[in-house]
Amino acid sequence: MTALGDRVYGAVANQPELYRSSPDGQSWTKVGAVPISNILIGWRGKLFSSEGSKVVYTTDEGQSWQPVFDVGGAALSGQSRFFISGDTLVFSHVANRRIYYSTDDGITFDTIPAPYETGAGFFRLRAFGNTFVLYIGNGENIYVSKNRGQQWLKIPMPGISVNSAID
C-alpha cells in the first residue's frame, strides 16, 4: 500500500490488480494493473513499482507503466523495497546487494556505497526522515548512514536478530 496525494493505492500479493481507496477508506475500486512484483510507492505524482529487473512508473493509475531504470541481473522481488526520505526515492535490490537513489523524480538513479562486503548473505534497508538516514543490516550488525553512504556507523547486535531489529 502507498499514498499519493489524498489517494491510497494497494495491490494484493501475486495479483496484477491495482486498487484505489475511497476518500473515507471504506471501499476499494480496481483502477488498473500493477506489475506482479507488488513493490509499490507513490512519489511526486507517480506510482513506482518494478517489472523484472526494471523500475517502472505510472501516472494514470496503472493503465500503462513506463520503464525508467534497469538494475540488470536478477528481477526485483518483494524483498526489494522503495522508501522516500526527504526529496529522495531510495530502493534496494536484494539480489544485487545494491542501494539506488533518485533526486530527480525517478528520471535517473545513482548507487549508494554499501557499508560492508556486498556478498554478505543478508540485506535489509530502511530509510527514515527528511534528512535521509539509512539503516542496513547483514545478519550480524546494523549500519547507519546520514550522508548517502559516504560514512557508515557499525552497530553490533549481539543476541538480537537484525531481521527483527530492521523490519
Image (tube, rainbow, N blue to C red):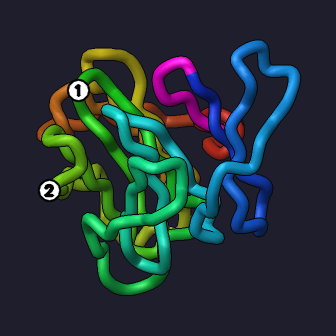
Residue sitting at x 38%, y 32%: 84
Residue 81, image x, y percentages: 51, 51
Left or right placement of residue 28 versus residue 36 in this view: right
Nearest the eye: 167 or 42 = 42
- Say above or below: 122 vs 147: below
Q: Residue at x 31, y 82 (%)?
A: 72
Which numbered circle lies on residue 87?
A: 1
Q: Which residues are magenta?
A: 1-6
> How many numbered marks are there?
2
- Residue 77 appears in which quarter of the rendering? bottom right
Residue beneath label 2, please?
108
Q: Residue at x 66, y 45 (%)?
A: 163
Tag 1–tag 2 contact (CB < 8 Å)? no
SS state under label 2: loop
Q: Position of residue 34 (x, y in %)?
A: 60, 62
Q: Quadrant of the C terminus?
A: top right
Q: Is residue 62 above or below residue 130?
A: below
Left or right for 117, reference 34: left
Provide the secondary structure element on which disc 1 rests.
loop
Q: Position of residue 59 (x, y in %)?
A: 39, 48
Among the two numbered marks 1 and 2 on one chain, the one whose residue lies closer to the N terminus: 1
Q: Quadrant of the N terminus?
A: top right
Is residue 2 magenta-colored? yes
Residue type beneath disc 1? Asp
For disc 1, the neighbor class at 10 Å (few under 14, some 14 to 19, many from 20) is some
Q: Is residue 124 visible?
A: no
Is 33 left or right of 66, judged from the image as shown? right
Q: Amino acid at mark 2?
A: Thr
